[in-house]
Image (cartoon, helix red, strand yellow):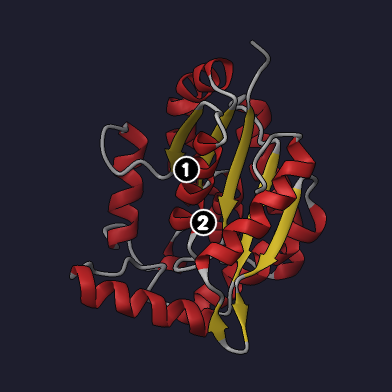
Amino acid sequence: MPEGKIVAFEGIDGSGKGTQAQALADRAAAHGLSVACFAFPRYSGSFYGELCVRYLRGEFGAIGDQSPYLSALPYAGDRLEAAPLIEAARRSHELVVIDRYVGSNAAHQGAKLSLDAFSHFAEWIARLEYEVHGIPAEDAVVMLDIPVETAAGLMAARRRDSGRVDDIHERDLEYLAEVRIRYQWMAANWAGWWSIACDEMDALRPPEGIAADIAAHLSGVLALPLAD
């Protein structure tokens, strides 16, 4: 069996990554493809993932209290732990869908640096995760681009519905705006990235329309039967 394709979804908090990752997985399965799914960070069952949870709770201080080079390590370690699982999934499935991957580490930790310093940091993250740790690389990355104000409204609705408490990244909208800029930089400069606007006239586009556009794009890029 040929190796499967890896697709990662990236974007700021509240951009709909989980929704679109699941939509792609469901669509692929409906077209007869075998699919495996992952999401990072892994909030349980991972040594490094548990450190990510503690960081996001604020146990190690505010966002800017640690060097981004150090705070990136638990996230990279979480994927290093999962690398054998991802590789096995790629060998046994036609499509592997991942909600957050290497780009999330670069964008969220790199937002602590100036934009001028970000390109060097992003290169360091890529070297750490793909070369030093040797995790499987994506075949395509979908970046869900959404204004911070729109994402903030969606996160507020999520809080009301679930009672979930925002983490230190989610509750700092100025920081999320910087994260979005880093994501836009990667979409413009990293190979295999594709950005899709998820808002229209200051409102979120229907998720079904976003999913259809993503499927059409990936059908061409990956040569898989995903579009209707």
Q: Is 108 left, or right, of 165 in this rendering? A: right
Query: Residue at position x 56%, y 75% from top?
Result: 205
* Comes first in the chain, label 2 or label 1: 1
Say which residue label 2 marks: 67
Q: At x 76% / y 67%, what residue is drawn?
A: 116
Looking at the rendered structure, the secondary structure element under dot 1 is helix
Picture coordinates of residue 108, whole percent (x, y): 53, 60
- Which residue occupies the extreme front position in the image? 228
Residue at 50%, 41% in the rendered image: 25
Residue 178 lies in what quarter of the image? bottom right
Q: Residues within 10 Å of mark 2 (few under 14, many from 20)?
A: few
Which residue type carries mark 2? Ser
Name the foreground residue: 54 vs 27.
Answer: 27
Q: In the figure, is residue 112 to the left or right of 2?
A: left
Residue of label 1: 26
The amino acid at mark 1 is Asp
From the top left corner, tell me how far across and down residue 201 is, in percent.
62, 89
Left or right, 47 with respect to 126, comes to: left
